[in-house]
Image (spheres, rainbow, N blue to C red):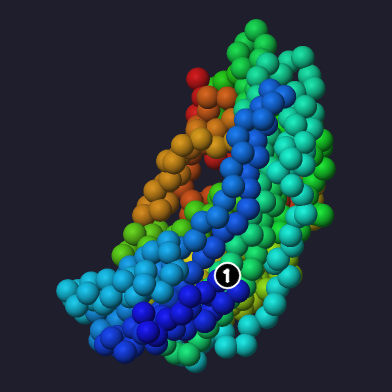
Amino acid sequence: MSSLTQTNENSVRAVLEQAVEYAKTQGADAVEVAANNDKGFSISARLGDVETVEHHNQRSLGVTVYRGQAKGSATTNDIKPASIQKTVDAALNIAGHTAEDKFSGLADAELMAYDYPQLDLDHSWGITPEQALELALQCEKSGRDDKRIVNSEGATVNSIRTQISYANSHGFVGDYFGTRHSVSCAVVAGDDNGMQRDYWYSVTRDPKQLEDVESIGRTARERTVRRLSGRSIKTCTVPVLFEPSVARTIFGHFFSAINGSALYREASFLVDSLNKQIFPDWISIHENPHVAGGLGSAPFDNEGVRTQKRDIVNSGVLQAYVLSSYSARKLGLQTTANAGGIHNIQINDSGLSQQELMKNMGTGVLITELIGHGVNTVTGDYSRGAAGFWIENGEIQYPVEEITVAGNLADMFMNISAIGNDIDLHGNIQCGSILIDHLTVAGS
């Protein structure tokens, strides 16, 4: 290919720029090219021996072209010049057979992240696979260090470095590296009443911030053993406390409901909810894509739009949706730089520990696991299988299982009475335990 030259990892930017220029010479009115490259390994140990060893070197490149407002897309795993040319040609051919969509096209040029911040996302972990295996063995050994642990699903150590690159015909080109390191452990406990499984994990950009592997195994063991001899309870309406690992899913449903694609399809119970009260007036929700080293940090979104801090909920009132440029145009709004997802959602807490929240609830259920997918974003109806613990006098009494938690998300949001300060930083949505005043808990 005369217009593209052979490249390596350090010149992917140049390849993207050349691909954009080639597409323009072939008749594209607008073009964008995105590339991702993951390198790393995953090591698992189970029952004191190596289980799996996987090396990752996965690359993908996607081309989207526009002829007028007719769109064509094609992908490849090969960034050799001849392969990229074929990919561009395939995208152009598709665009030639696609109907025009007045809402399609690149994000607006003035929104591009021409000057984007460095966010401290790239931290290599200088260990060999052999050393990673030793960490996994230590983690699992700690997880199994109790006679009630009868089996193991293993411990896993992952280390991945990703290069994210994007260019378009506005003249924008950007790329950055990010690392993601994790250690996890899952074990199985048993007694005369049956078996129970639970897990624990730690994930960070910087390996120095990972939780100690023996501590991860110990937490997995303790969480598993405490679930033994679980029982069902009679159906009741009580306060429900969701621990952080499951609490974030409650807010996850909120973000699904304010996602642009759900809104313009009118497939959300929060259609036309902008500037309306969604949560109690003490709750505010912020997006901060520029947290140094944050797991959800990104200098630009999947369309090259510069990311920025913003309020999504202020004093309980919905301030903004979650939009790409396409969904924004469909709604008559402007993109919120969320093509590809949300970034570092931060939710204010009530300043109370989980133990203090249990004291406040008195009698109710602490949920530690949710099962199934019984959530209807169109109506807000919520019904999921669950497991956890029965609480009386603010203290854990016994484990419960085979229960269902049911309600409506609109009511659940408004009935949040407190959020704990035990904030879980493992994911894009960072929150503590959530106490909801009353929910139906169906049991026996």
Look at the numbered disc 1 and give the secondary structure of its residue.
helix
- Toward which corner of the image does residue 327 lie, by quadrant? bottom left
What percent of the width, then of the height, locates residue 162?
Answer: 60, 62
Q: Residue at horizontal 58%, vertical 25%?
A: 401
Q: Is residue 204 above or below residue 155?
A: below
Identify the residue at horizontal 70%, vertical 44% (top origin). 129
Which residue, given by chain and number where applicable, does mark 1 sit on? 9
Residue 103 lies left or right of residue 192; in this view the side is left
Q: Report the side of 360 relative to 367 (left or right).
A: right
The residue located at (70%, 77%) in the rendering is 118
Label 1 amino acid? Glu
Decide if residue 348 is in sight here: no
Q: Nearer the viewer, residue 199 or 252?
A: 199
In-image side of 305 versus 365 (left or right) = left
Residue 205 relative to residue 142: left or right:
left
* Residue 387 in view in this figure: yes
**27 vs 44: above or below:** below
Q: Residue 19, image x and y in percent?
A: 41, 80
Rendered image quadrant of residue 194 = top right
Callout 1 crowding tier (Cα within 10 Å): few <14, some 14–19, many ≥20:
few
| Number of numbered labels in the structure image | 1
Q: Nearer the viewer, residue 208 or 380?
A: 208
The location of residue 124, given as percent across then percent down, is 74, 60
Answer above or below: position of 13 versus 392.
below
Place of residue 434 in the rendered image (x, y in percent of width and height, measured from the top left): 66, 48
The residue under the point 54% across, 63% down is 37
Q: Is 246 above or below relative to 177?
A: above
